[in-house]
Amino acid sequence: MNKLYINGEWVDAIDGETLDLINPATEEKIITLPAAGGKDCHIAIAAAEKAFVQWSKTTPYTRAVILKSAAQYIRDNLTAFAGDMVTESGKPLAEAKGEWTVAANLFEWYAEEAKRAYGRVIPTNRPDKRSSVIWQPMGVIGVITAWNFPAYNPARAWAAALAAGCTLVVKPAETTPLSAFRLADALIRSGLPPGVLNLLIGDPASIGEEMLNNPALRKISFTGSTRVGKLLMDGASRTHTKLSLELGGNAPVLIFGDVDIEKTARAAASARFRNNGQVCIAPQRFYVEQSIFERFAERLTHYVAQLKVGNGFEEGVHVGPLITRRQRDSVLDLLERAKAQQARVLTGGQRLDQKGFFVQPAVITGVDQSSVLARNEIFGPLLPLFSFEGIDDAIEKANDTEYGLAAYVFTNDLNTALLAAERLEFGIVGINEWAPHGTEAPFGGWKHSGQGHESGQEGLYEYMEKKLISIGGLPG
Ligand code: NAD
């Protein structure tokens, strides 16, 4: 294990390249790993293409046995798997365990859902004709994923694509490969045939290029930044590579004047800093109705100041380090730029005076729509507070972004909740809910936040082709 996995074997990179994995909480090296490039990717795609011939012919029932066994293996080894995740990502152990539980659930859910990829029989307008629609696996899929959820991001794409009957060349993030190795190992131990899943860690650009240039690879499922998503869109015309894109977000949170201030402020402090704010649907731009702004800001600051920052293995830690030095510096840079625009820090925002990429969670006021904290995806532990007057103002400010992934609304008024939900230009809207997602529910963004869906029934069909079978010349 802990190498590239190509055609059923754990191997080194062809060119002998390596990369060092760093623990973000200690800045120490965890392990040196082989680093793949385009040549390794070429071989992996060939292996996946060959394996597709048999794998695509298996029934969803056969595939379900392997996926469910992998789910059980994950559950049986939850603590060890979660430990690896904390080491590579820094997130608190409880969050890591929760994430692995969801990964197992995804494997199990898609094992069952693929059995229900029903087609359709269509009544025709001619007595000698019959029409039906069937679903078939798409072929070799490339899966490229981000580090922020080292098990969940790969699991939701791998599970759906494997259940659909596709074979895979996967490239998890270089900063969090250990969880991906574990995920692959669970499938291999459960009987996944050689070539069905091929795993590469390495140079993103050359692996991505090979995926785009190689006509045998039918689709790339990408979870990551809008910047790289657009690069893939530019390259996809070469061999007509299909794309599913789960990209960045900049979620607004509308807090109306009728909420329970204490309860909402306490929950907001915890929701905003889950995974250190490094979440695509992270509640980011907090719009609070003017009538309760001061009181809400005071209670929120109270709770945020109490969050404990530290190594994810330590008892009672709420917030770990940022994933890399670069990510930490980009968050601190955003904060400095916001301060230059008159932003005021109510608590936090400083680096911890120790090894590791730690930043104390911050609450910020004095910002408006032109602030860098409103325009950019922060992906870190900063919580900017904005104000609004009435629902029209709230919706206008919330929609004033190129992103369209998730939005949140907090109110006890049914009319306000419904109107806001319908007028928000986002693929996911949470009403009085900080976790608006689930294994069984579609997850996808509008505008620059992506195209296509992961998870839920929709996630399965991202990896299947629809075929019309039209039979004529029948005795009428
Ligand atoms: P990123 O785009 O830099 O990297 C994501 C993945 O793409 C990594 O595996 C990386 O190695 C790879 N990559 C980088 N350059 C590439 C290239 N030229 N060709 C092919 N692959 C390339 O994103 P990141 O900073 O690692 O992750 C954070 C971003 O991911 C945030 O914007 C976040 O919102 C987004 N994200 C979205 C979702 C979602 O479901 N919408 C989920 C998680 C993260």
Image: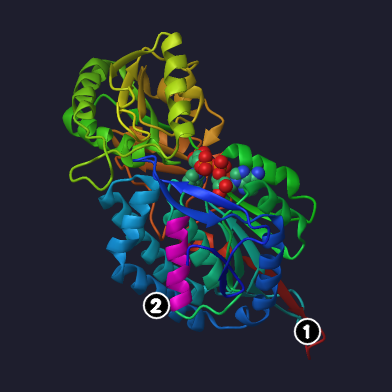
Residue 364: name its quadrant. Answer: top left
Question: In this figure, which residue is indicated by the disc labeled 1?
Answer: 128
In the rendered image, residue 180 lying in the magenta stretch gets the answer: yes
Question: In this figure, which residue is indicated by the disc labeled 2?
Answer: 69
Identity of the residue furthest to the bottom in this view: 475
Mark 1–mark 2 contact, CB under 8 Å? no
Q: Where is 328 relative to 190, above or below? A: above
Identity of the residue furthest to the right in this view: 473
Q: Where is 176 relative to 471, above or below? A: above
Q: Nearer the viewer, residue 389 or 319?
A: 319
How far apart are labels 1 and 2 at the CA level? 47 Å
Residue 351: name its quadrant. Answer: top left
Position of 19 compared to 45: left or right? left
Q: Secondary structure at mark 1?
A: loop
Residue 114 in picture, x, y percent from top left: 50, 73
Residue type pointed to by label 2: Ser
Residue 386 in picture, x, y percent from top left: 37, 19
Q: Residue at x 54, y 53 (%)?
A: 453
In the rendered image, residue 319 lying in the magenta stretch gets the answer: no
Residue 72: name its quadrant. Answer: bottom left
Residue type pointed to by label 1: Asp
Question: Alpha-carbon neighbours of circle 1 within 10 Å: few (<14), some, or many (≥20)?
Answer: few
Which secondary structure class fits the magenta region best? helix
Residue numbers of the magenta segment = 177-189
Q: Residue at x 77, y 78 (%)?
A: 126
